[in-house]
Amino acid sequence: MTHHPDASYPGFSGAEHSGMGHADPGAAPPPGCPAHQVPVQVPVTPLYGPDFAADPHAVYARLRTYGPAAPVELAPGAHATLVTDYRAALEVLRSPEVFGKDARHWRALADGTVAPDNPVVPMMAYRPNCLFSDGEAHRRFRAAVNDSLARIDPNALRGYVERSADTLIDRFAALGEADLLGSYAKMLPLLVFQQLFGCPPELGDRLVEGFSGIFDGVDHERADALITQSLDELIGLKHVTPGADMTSWLMAHPAGLTDEEMLHQLVVLIGAGTEPQQNLIANALRLLLSDDRFAGDLAGGSMPVEDALDEVLWLDPPMANYGVHYPFQDVDFGGVPLNAGEPVVISFAAANTDPALHSDQRTGNRAHLAWSAGPHTCPAKDAARLIAAVAVEKLLDRLPDLELAVPVDRLVWRPGPFHRALTALPVRFPPVAPSKPAKPNKPSKAATPRTAPSSVTPQHPSSPHPSPEPPGDSRWTARPAPSVPTPSTPPAATSTPRQPASGPAAPRRPWSFLAEWWRGQ
């Protein structure tokens, strides 16, 4: 039996299970009533370190024995309650009147119990964006995000992902081996978000480095500073030269976002479009290359990519534990006491594998919670799934004899409480010749419906040669805009002039080849 996350899930209603209903105060408790027994002291389970990363589902199974939710430690000193029950997860996600998203309710952070430099704070602390807001503020931010995402043409997006995938595959196709995480799954979302957000590659380098640090909890203060500085530069760039990109559309939306609000919408959108996206691609490839159910289909010439994505979103969603909420008041939640202002974290991975679902049928089943549910469900889930499907399909089409270079049980998972992420995905395959490089799109002087990409490589003023346009299609606005544009952004796709370099070149990083590629170096 399966249930859609946006439909009512009977059996775990607020009145019946969470203690939010009313009882007769004069009625005597029945013998053995759980609510009047001495509470059992439940141990606090850490969700960090290599042991949890290696086998999180064993941890979830143990936590289930304590009820629908159990106490956990996200990082040293940062405590929360983890919801492992599917119905309980829906109860939290669909009850904004009881559980809020605004992290300013987080008492332990406000009173100093959790230090500001705790590694999980950047992933949980309040930001004025659609992820961490409630009520009218959430509706305003969400409208700007939804309307801007609606301007993306999925056909143009698919074409750009395909061309970007070919470019990346060409870099290792003749080698016969590759790390698909570092050389492909991590790079493809970078190319896509730079195009969608009109982001020059130098800023993209810094943003990816910053978001990787945030998700890993490594030197998060420096990571947060990198993100803030880079997005400030991007917003400043779009004030001067708006284009056909998400950044410009958000700035022009009738919601009237301030620069600070703009920055924080971009934090959640770009953060969700890089780290979780690369994990979805890599986890799907791992499954396709290691699971006999899929390997047989691949050998037969078919590519059950959509089936693999469903399986990953059920069993190993890229964001395994997140959806942080805060009760507005003390709540008895299915026999588990929740204190007001205490973080309640949804384990999407545990909820999806709840034995109470009574179903192993995941192919074509989209009732999983990988995209969350309720008012804060992922607004870009269709685009995210399209990008992942095209990325996997293109790779398997170009390299049909791909196989893992190590046994699947030797793959290493990155520690961290929130994500489900590999450290590497080494593969081997018979070397193949690169595809014929696509010529860059060059706009003519006459007006054309197919415009140049809105993000181009910044050029140093002293450079004698212009940068070539990046390949791809920026015709994202194939449909009318859902809102009336303001004078700050053209109503249709436009070609944006080149910008001067924003500062000295950063040290070379593994993904910096993109800037060189766009310059033809």
Image: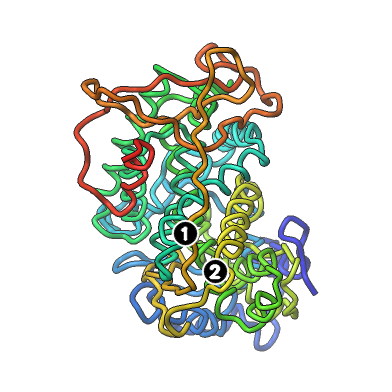
Q: How crowded is mark 2: few (under 14 residues within 10 Å), some or many (20 or more)?
A: many
Instruction: Residue under label 1, please give it.
Output: 185
Point out residue 454 in the picture as x, y percentages from the top left corner: 48, 27
x and y, in percent, of residue 214 in the image = 34, 54
The residue shown at (20%, 46%) is 507
Image location of residue 172, percent across then percent down:
41, 61
Dot 2 amino acid type: Leu
Badge 1 density bin: few <14, some 14–19, many ≥20, Cα 10 Å? many
Q: Of callouts 2 and 1, which one flags the residue occurring earlier in the amino acid sequence?
A: 1
* Disc sitting over residue 68 in the figure: none
Whether residue 72 is visible to the viewer of this picture, yes or no, is yes
Query: Quick check: marks 2 and 1 in contact, CB under 8 Å?
Result: yes
**Which image quarter holds the N terminus?**
bottom right
Residue denoted by label 2:
285
Left or right position of 518 against 249: left
In what element is the residue under mark 1? helix
Report the Cα–Cα distance between label 2 and label 1: 9 Å
> How many numbered tags mark residues here?
2
SS type, badge 2: helix
Up-down: is 297 above or below 380? Answer: below
Q: Which of 504 and 206 is in front in this view?
A: 504
